[in-house]
Each structure stands twice: as structure tokens, then as C-alpha cells.
Amino acid sequence: MPASPIPCAPRSCDIFKVILVGTDGSESADRALSLASDLAREHQSRLLVVHVDEIGGYESKLLTETRREIHDKIRDQVEALKADGLDAHFELRQMTITSPAHALADAAAGVADLIVLGNVGSGPLKGLLLGSVAYRMLHIAPCPVMVVPKPES
């Protein structure tokens, strides 16, 4: 027989007042945003959607247009969440170093109670050699991190 849930007063069990979602506009990030928005509804949390742009060096017109498309997509997702009644906000962070995990950790510091990320699932060797934002976040995040796995092929 399953244990019954622990009763609590309304909002007293809502430990996630602010949920930060790191997104790069990918399918994996979309899954993380979907799960985080469900959690935000359940806990009546504020949702902070953060995208990190790595800038510097040669910026091609194609790269600039791709970035704009990603930003527009994420803004549209956040506007849809707002229209659905969520307290959702979009934040764009730009950085010149190649560590989106540090930019996300900085965005979460003192603000977020949970960070939600999608896992691209590039494999342990590629993640070790090239770096994995999700893996790095597990070591530097100022709050708990939830990594949404890539679905089975």
C-alpha cells in the first residue's frame, strides 16, 4: 500500500518559489521548459527562463540571424506561458567566455530555488571532452539542479 502524502498547509510545501530554466532553444531545452512550467503551475512559482549567448570573435551574419531566431522563439514561449497564467520572465545573458554554466549559476544565485536543464545526451566521452552544461551545473549551482533526460530513441 503506497504511503499517503504528508499533509501541509497551502503554500507551506512549495519550496520552489523561483524556478530557473536554462535554454538554448533546442528540443532538449523545450522539454525542460515544459517540465519546469508544469512544476511552476503546481507550486505557484515564478519561472525565470534564461538563455546564454557566447559572444566574441567573428560574428557572421548567419550566426546573428540564428541567434535572433532563437531569442524570438524563447520570447514567444515565455509569452505563451504568461498567456497561460504563469509568472514567467525571459532573461538574456551574454558572455565572452565559453561557460554557459557559470552564467546560469550567476543568474540563479540568490534568486532561484531550482534550476531545470535539458540534457542533450551527447554521451560521457563527448561531454567530458567538450564540456556539458548540465554536468558542470551539478558542481557549481547555488541550488538544486534537475536535468531532464533525452528521450529514448
Image (tube, grey):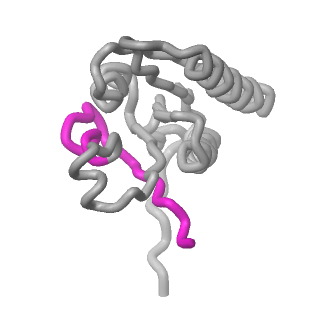
The residue depicted at 21 percent of the width and 35 percent of the height is 140
Q: Where is residue 77 in the image (x, y as percent from the top left)?
A: 70, 31
Extreme bottom residue here?
1
Task: Residue at 53% x, 71% y: name it.
Answer: 152
Q: Is residue 33 visible?
A: yes
Measured as percent of width and height from the top left, residue 107 is found at 37, 20
Up-down relation of residue 127 to residue 3 (above or below): above
54 falls in the magenta region: no
Magenta residues, as a range?
135-153
Q: Nearer the viewer, residue 90 or 100?
A: 100
Q: Name the residue rendered at 48%, 48% in the picture.
A: 118
Q: Which of 10 and 109 is in front in this view?
A: 109
- Whether the magenta-drawn stretch holds residue 147 is answered as yes
Q: In which quarter of the image is the C terminus?
A: bottom right
**Would you place residue 53 above or below residue 36 in this image?**
above
The residue that appears at 47% across and 29% down in the rendered structure is 18
Residue lying farthest to the left in this orientation: 139
The answer to whether 27 is drawn above or below residue 124 in the figure is above
- Specify whether 80 is left or right of 109: right
Q: Which of 106 and 8 is in front in this view?
A: 106
Q: Where residue 73 sits: x, y (%)? A: 69, 28
Q: Which of 96 and 115 is in front in this view?
A: 96
| Residue 42 appears in the rendering | no
Residue 122: percent from the left, percent from the top? 39, 57
Q: In this view, does 71 lie to the left or right of 59?
A: right
Total numbered labels: 0
